[in-house]
Amino acid sequence: MATVDLVMPKMGESIMEATILKWHKQPGDAVKMDETVLEIATDKVDSEVPSTAEGVLDELLFAVNDVVPVGAIIARIKTGASEENKNPAPQTAQPQPAADKTVSEPKADVQPDRPEVNQPSKNENTGGNKFYSPLVLNIAAQEGVSLSELEKIPGTGNEGRVTKRDILQYVSDKRNGKIGSATQTSSNNIPQQPTPQRDEQRMPAAVNEKPVSYSGNVEIMEMDRMRRLIADHMVRSKHTSPHVTSFTEADVTNLVLWRNKVKSEFEKREGTKITFTPLFIEAIVKCIKRFPLINSSLDGNNIIVKKDINIGMATALPTGNLIVPVIRNADGLNLVGLSKKVNGLADAARNNKLKPEDIADGTFTLTNVGTFGSLMGTPIINQPQVAILAVGAIKKRPVVIETPNGDSIAIRHMMYLSMSYDHRIVDGSLGATFLTAVANELENFKADRDF
């Protein structure tokens, strides 16, 4: 009887971890190939993880609400189980009770192929009962945080565990001089500290936490899980990339008039509506081919120029949150194909039917802030991309236009465009030139074209 490891699947280049929402199967349950074993959530989408083998679920290595790195082993399945083994006795199927060793103990070796970070066993963590996930230990190793320092970080996770956010906050405070370096010791020489001393060291943090009072008539709403993850993703993006935003405007009169003329025939012939989004994407794709550095990412000191043009489009969910489904190989689609992709992904997003692959591997993002009436915006880069373009509301305005007979004033459909870009890779000249090129594509839209 063989054992198959079920691992946390990769769900996109920028997604490094996921939260377990629900286990559909428990140890001892029979599972079929591709049958849903658990539900997970990232900052972008909720998804189901199917079984990669047929057999009996042997053990669970993580609990509900645990944050698990991509590639970590989350469960084990015994294959080739006979019929009598598909309903084993409860004592061999259920995880050990809480009074014994905790179920989360195997986390210390959930990913053997990851670099060694001196991960101690549970009993070696300064003699206490604290457990640190592989992700937290990896961050600690990268940032030079010893395990003795980890012991002093108050955890906000389940059972007081130190979460990713806790250690990142600690690192930030340490860099800003809010935490002294006198307590730093080598991670290989950790002093044994009794529990009372650790409690005393945590007390100042609790004492300094003053309750916040709100004056006036207020309503306090807790952020939902997705909003918290989005907030963390946005803060991380601003911390990672030096943002620069350039602005321009475009006369999109020809584009607007053409769409108004063909939209009824387009929907009748192609079975889908034509919105402005595929027209914008078409112009962006043409300009990316001329300025390929816009379609890149940064890996250390290496610039990774992407040959695939995968355009993400920010889409509003019924909850008010945003998600970014991705149109893969957008340069290989004509206007009809782009329209069908845009409408299909937008419908899937609104009905919570997006799959992990629908939001993965984007290389450039478009966000239409004009949908909500905004004239322009300063969007935040969707990591690890290096640029995001926002289009504002299309408004009729009197503008000066050049004619063979001289300048004149006319009523035109005008739109502002803004693009935020990572100044580590994209300089102002390239960012502004690319943005102007997109505006020119829209202004020079052929009013007599077919679709």
Image (cartoon, grey):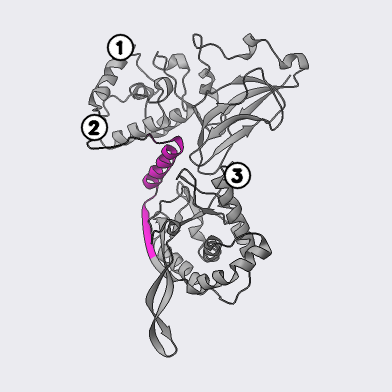
Let me know if residue 115 appears in the view: no
Q: In which quarter of the image is the C terminus?
A: bottom right
Residue 357 badge: 3
Residue 214 % position (x, y): 24, 35
What is the CA distance from the residue labelled 2 to the residue labelled 3?
Answer: 44 Å
User: Nearer the observer, disc 1 or disc 3?
Assistant: 3
Callout 3, which amino acid? Answer: Glu
- Element at badge 2? loop
Residue 196 badge: 1
Q: Nearer the viewer, residue 411 or 53?
A: 411
Callout 2, which amino acid? Answer: Ser
- Element at badge 3? helix
Residue 198 % position (x, y): 31, 16
- Give residue 250's quadrant in the image: bottom left
| Marks 2 and 3, the one that precedes in the sequence | 2
Residue range highlighted in magenta: 222-247
Q: Quadrant of the N terminus?
A: top right
Mark 3: few/some/many CA within 10 Å (<14, 14-19, 20+): few
Majority secondary structure in the magenta region = helix
User: Nearer the observer, disc 1 or disc 2?
Assistant: 2
Compared with residue 416, is residue 351 higher up or lower down, i.e. above or below? above
Callout 1, which amino acid? Answer: Pro
Q: Mark 2 = which residue?
A: 213
Outermost residue, bottom side: 405
Mark 1: few/some/many CA within 10 Å (<14, 14-19, 20+): few
- Give residue 109's quadrant in the image: top right
Outermost residue, right side: 83
